[in-house]
Amino acid sequence: MKVFTNDQAKGIATQLGYRPEYVAEALFHLLGNDWVVRIKKGVYGVSVNSGLGSSPHEFERAMSIAPFSAISHWTAMHYHHMTQQTPNIVFASTSDRCPRVCGSSKSMYHFIKVKKEKFFGIENIWIDDAQVQITDPEKTLLDGLISPQYCGDFQEVFHAFKMFGDQINVERIVEYALMLDHATIKRLGWVLDALGYKNRVISKLLRFPIKGYRKLDASAPAKGIYNSKWMIQENIGSL
C-alpha cells in the first residue's frame, strides 16, 4: 500500500498484535525519518527513502486527497499529448468540496470545483500499479474552453485542439458541449470552424439558440470584434 489512511494503519497494527494507540507514535517516527510523507490529515504515502519501492505517483496522491475527483485541465492535456508544456501543478476536478492539501506535500495540487452534472467524460487509467481517473480528451479540451486559466491560457488550449487534430472525436465533443453551458457550445463551434471542420459536422452547435454575445477567452477582458455567426466576441490576439 503506497497510500494509506490512519484507520488502515490501525487495522493492520491490530492484526500484527500492536495496540491501536501505538500507531500515532509509530507514524510520528516514520514521518521524522522520512519513511512516510503526510499527504493530508489522516492520509500518508510511502517515501522513496523507506526502501519499499517508489513513492506514490502524483496522480495517485491527488486521488487520495480528493477521492471524488479526476485529473483534468492542463495536467490532462499533458497526459493526452496535447501540449508540449509540462505543468508544475497537478490540476484535478472534483464534484465534492475542494480539499486542503498539507503544506508538507512535495507536489502542488489545484482542485477545481465543478457541479455534479458537469462531472462527466471520465476514464480510468493505470499509473504504475494504481488506477486513477482522468478526463478523456474531448472533456479535457472543453474544460480548457471553460477555464483556460487552468490550462496555461486560451492560446495553449487552441494549440491543444490543433495538436490533437484528427484524433478528436467530433461527435463526442459536440454531444459533451451540448450538456454544458451556452458559452462553451459557441466557443467550441468557433474553434472547430477555425480549424476547418465543415458546417454539417458542427451544425448542432451553429443552430443552438443563444441571446447575446459570449467571450471567446473566458479569462480575458471583454474587448475585440464580434462574430455574428457564432455570437462570440473574439477577445484574443493572434493565434
Image (spheres, rainbow, N blue to C red):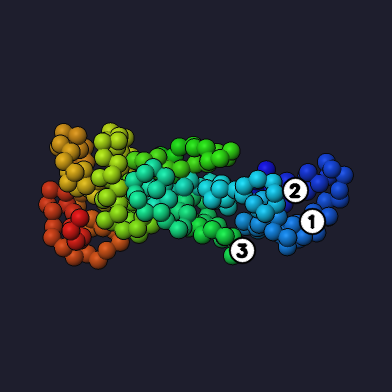
Residue under pointer 1: 26
The answer to whether residue 225 of the structure is visible from this angle is: yes
Residue 102 placement: quadrant: bottom right
Give the amino acid at mark 3.
Answer: Ser
Of discs 2 and 3, which sits in the foreground? 3
Give the amino acid at mark 2.
Answer: Ala
Residue 239 coordinates in the image, percent (x, y): 20, 55
Residue 90 coordinates in the image, percent (x, y): 47, 54
Of discs 2 and 1, which sits in the foreground? 1
Q: Foreground: 77 or 193?
A: 77
Q: Is residue 203 left or right of residue 63?
A: left
Point out which mark residue 9 bears.
2
Mark 1: few/some/many CA within 10 Å (<14, 14-19, 20+): few
Q: Is residue 89 left or right of residue 200?
A: right
Residue under pointer 3: 104
Are the residues tagged 1 and 3 within 8 Å (C-beta)?
no
Looking at the rendered structure, the secondary structure element under dot 3 is loop
Give the amino acid at mark 1.
Answer: Ala
For marks 2 and 1, the one nearer the N-term is 2
Indicate the quadrant containing the N terminus: top left, top right, bottom left or bottom right: top right
Are the residues tagged 2 and 3 within 8 Å (C-beta)?
no
**Whether residue 88 is situated above or below residue 56 in the rendered picture:** below
Residue 154 coordinates in the image, percent (x, y): 28, 56
For marks 1 and 3, the one nearer the N-term is 1
Point out which mark residue 71 bears.
none
